[in-house]
Amino acid sequence: MPRRPLGILRRPRRGRHLARVTVHGTEGPARDWIRSYAARRGRRSALTQERMARFLPQRRIPEGPLDQEAAFGRVAPLVLEIGCGHGAAAIAYCRTHPDHDLLAVDVHTPGVARMMAAADEADVPNLRVAMGDAVFLLRDRLTHGSLHAVHLFFPDPWPKKGHAKRRFVSALTLDLIADRLAPGAALLVATDQDHYAEHTLAALEGHDGRWDVVVGERPTWRPTDGFEAKGLRAGRVIHDIRATRPG
């Protein structure tokens, strides 16, 4: 049976195996990566199509390994945001850190289109986007020690025990992130799901790399909206985790 191209993912169905591909890490044997998202199919709205056509050519990074000078017009501390949603956190970071560059990666076109439109309205020059799976971006397009920080805010929680392998935080992703972070750089995770916070802390504790972990420090620049606002309205605790690579 021919292999399905990596860029195509069927929506998981009841009783079906979760989408799985093989990832070859920077070191060691290949391991299976079960994607942490389900593809959303359907027609794009006219507004989404217009936004993508208008803004993507200027905001999308060139294909291949990241050339920061070509993508941003400069070389500055680079932050990767994984799963940018509608872009509120990404835009807020760019506005409060004009001397940094931020690369937002996501698979969901409407959210990326909305973020790019908002970034244009806010006149944010230091934001770029990559469409696709963050794992392959980390593996194939970013280099050792190139990141100042990685932001993972309110990822898909996958609360069922049987879906735990779909959670983005895993030994494999921590391997990639640890390699791409510069010494003293940090992974920031935020979630309103207790089980995901526990899962993340356990994964960090069990990871081969060394991490200095601090819990409860919320970034002052991050806006309280979207999933965070929804969680607060529901009475849930917001868990902020900062895991720093020793300098």
Image (cartoon, rainbow, N blue to C red):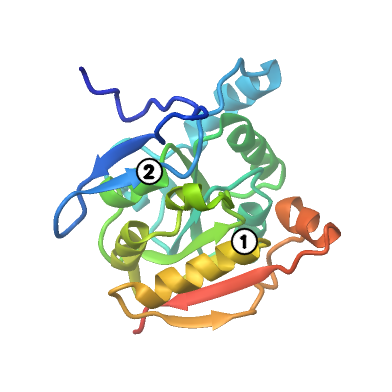
Task: Tell me which corner region of the image, top left, top right, bottom left or bottom right, holds residue 207.
Answer: bottom left
What is the three-letter code of the residue carrying label 1? Answer: Tyr
Residue where numbered disc 2 is placed: 34
Which mark lies nearer to you, 1 or 2? 2
Q: Which residue is drawn at 53% across and 58% down?
A: 152
Foreground residue among 158 and 50: 158
Q: Where is residue 201 in the image (x, y as percent from the top left)?
A: 49, 73
One can see residue 98 in this view? no
Q: Residues within 10 Å of mark 1 (few under 14, many from 20)?
A: many
Local secondary structure at mark 1? helix
Q: Counting residues from the N terminus, which is met first, the one under dot 1 or under dot 2?
A: 2
Task: Tell me which corner region of the image, top left, top right, bottom left or bottom right, holds residue 97.
Answer: bottom right
Q: Which residue is drawn at 67% across and 58% down?
A: 92
Q: Position of residue 193 (x, y in %)?
A: 65, 61
Quadrant occupied by the C terminus: bottom left
Foreground residue among 190 and 182: 190
Quadrant occupied by the N terminus: top left
Local secondary structure at mark 2? strand
One can see residue 214 in this view? yes
Asked if the residue under mark 2 is in contact with the one under mark 1, i.e. CB atoms within 8 Å, the reply is no
The disc label shown at residue 93, or none:
1
User: Whole-Å distance between the Cαs marked 1 and 2?
Assistant: 30 Å
What is the three-letter code of the residue carrying label 2? Answer: Ile
Foreground residue among 226 and 65: 226
Q: Residue at x 72, y 52 (%)?
A: 227
